[in-house]
Image (cartoon, rainbow, N blue to C red):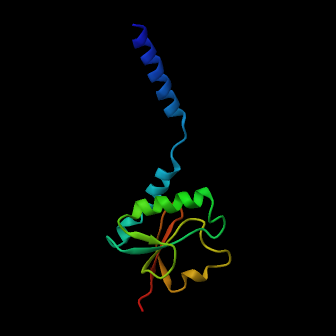
Amino acid sequence: MLALAWSLVAGASAVRAALAQPPDPTQRLEAEFVELVPRLPPSGEVGYLDRYQNAGDDDALRARYAAQYAFAPRVLLSRVGPEFLIVAEGTERPGGDARLQGYFLVATTPAGHRLFRRFAR
């Protein structure tokens, strides 16, 4: 009887602790990027621009990994050049971004992530 009571108390404590944790930002980011998937080809390489400021911080890395999972089986490349280019929110350089020359805007998510496509050559 004591073991059963202890199990119930421990189980309730674990549930309370799980509910008290903040939501996982990676899942939110992945859901934001998934909104662009229908506009991409089913496979291939897609360019991805990392943030201009704080490129190596935890938020930028989390966004990059969330994008890679959201766009799989496509492969994200950290450069311009591929036909499609993902520009995460907060990425564009101040005063305009020369890296976007030759691309036109295809879509923007409510979170501010943008999809560009290269002009035909």
Asked which quadrant contains residue 39, the reply is bottom left
| Furthest residue toward bottom | 121
Horizontal side of 79 relative to 51 (left or right) equals: left
Q: Position of residue 96 (x, y in %)?
A: 64, 79
| Furthest residue toward top | 1
Q: Is residue 66 visible?
A: yes
Q: Please tell me which residue is depicted at 47% across the width and 28% down the height of the picture.
A: 15
| Furthest residue toward front | 3
**Residue 101 vertical placement versus 53 (above, below):** below
- 60 vs 32, nearest the viewer: 60
Q: Position of residue 77 (x, y in %)?
A: 47, 73
| Furthest residue toward left | 42
Q: Position of residue 22 (x, y in %)?
A: 55, 41
- 15 vs 107, nearest the viewer: 15
Q: Is residue 34 visible?
A: no
- 108 vs 40, nearest the viewer: 40
Identify the image quadrant of the N terminus.
top left
Horizontal side of 70 relative to 98 (left or right) equals: left
Q: How many marks?
A: 0
Q: Position of residue 110 (x, y in %)?
A: 50, 61
Identify the image quadrant of the C terminus.
bottom left
Q: Please tell me which residue is depicted at 42% across the width and 59% down the height of the picture.
A: 69
Q: Please tell me which residue is depicted at 60% across the width and 73% down the height of the picture.
A: 92
